[in-house]
């Protein structure tokens, strides 16, 4: 059975080692570079606090730490949750 709750973004880290160039010709090393992020989300399911990490692709909107996100989890396995920004 699926349940829905809200989670809080604990931290957001930029993956510096995975640079994606968006321009065909660059004037500098960081000209047109975008990076993917990893967000760590905390949520409570059935009275137990869980943490989940979500990989955010380069160029996508990144949530700010402290913001809330929607979490959908299964009551049988609350650690396996789907995060929706």
Image (tube, helix red, strand yellow):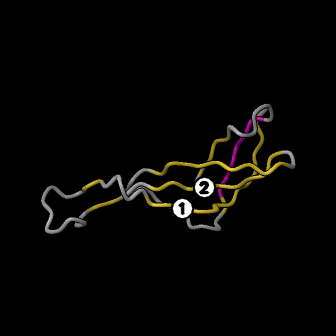
Q: Quadrant of the N terminus?
A: top right
Relative to 77, residue 28 above or below: below
Q: Residue furthest right?
A: 47
Determine whether label 2 and label 1 are within 8 Å by CB: yes
Report whether 85 appears left or right of 77. Answer: left
Provide the residue designation for mark 2.
40
Is 83 in front, or is 41?
41
Task: Measuring from the top left, give residue 83's x and y in whole percent.
Answer: 62, 47
Q: Which residues are drawn in magenta?
A: 69-74
Crowd tier of the residue under label 2, counting other residues whose Cα lies within 10 Å: few below 14, some 14–19, many 20 or above: some
SS at badge 2: strand
Task: Measuring from the top left, give residue 37's x and y in whole percent.
Answer: 46, 56
- By secondary structure, the bulk of the magenta-drawn segment is best described as strand
Residue 59 inside the magenta-drawn segment: no
Report whether 78 appears left or right of 14. Answer: right
Relative to 45, residue 80 above or below: above
Provide the residue designation for mark 1.
12
Q: Earlier along the polypeptide chain: callout 2 or callout 1?
A: 1
Q: Quadrant of the C terminus?
A: bottom right
| Residue in the picture at 70% in, 43% down | 72
Relative to 13, residue 48 above or below: above
Is 57 in front, or is 28?
28
Report whether 14 appears left or right of 67. Answer: left
Is 31 in front, or is 82?
31
Report whether 46 appears left or right of 61. Answer: right
Crowd tier of the residue under label 1, counting other residues whose Cα lies within 10 Å: few below 14, some 14–19, many 20 or above: many
SS at badge 1: strand
Is 2 in front, or is 50?
50
**Which dot marks residue 78?**
none
Question: Gap between marks 2 and 1, in whole Å?
Answer: 6 Å
| Residue in the picture at 85% in, 45% down | 46
């Amino acid at each position: 059975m699926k349940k829905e709750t809200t989670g809080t973004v604990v931290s957001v880290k930029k993956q510096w080692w995975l640079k994606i160039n968006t321009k065909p010709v660059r004037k500098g090393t960081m000209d047109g570079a975008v990076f993917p992020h990893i967000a760590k989300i905390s949520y409570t399911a059935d009275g137990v606090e869980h943490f989940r990490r979500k990989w955010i692709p380069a160029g996508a909107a990144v949530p700010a730490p402290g913001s809330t996100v929607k979490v959908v989890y299964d009551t049988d396995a609350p650690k396996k949750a789907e995060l929706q920004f």
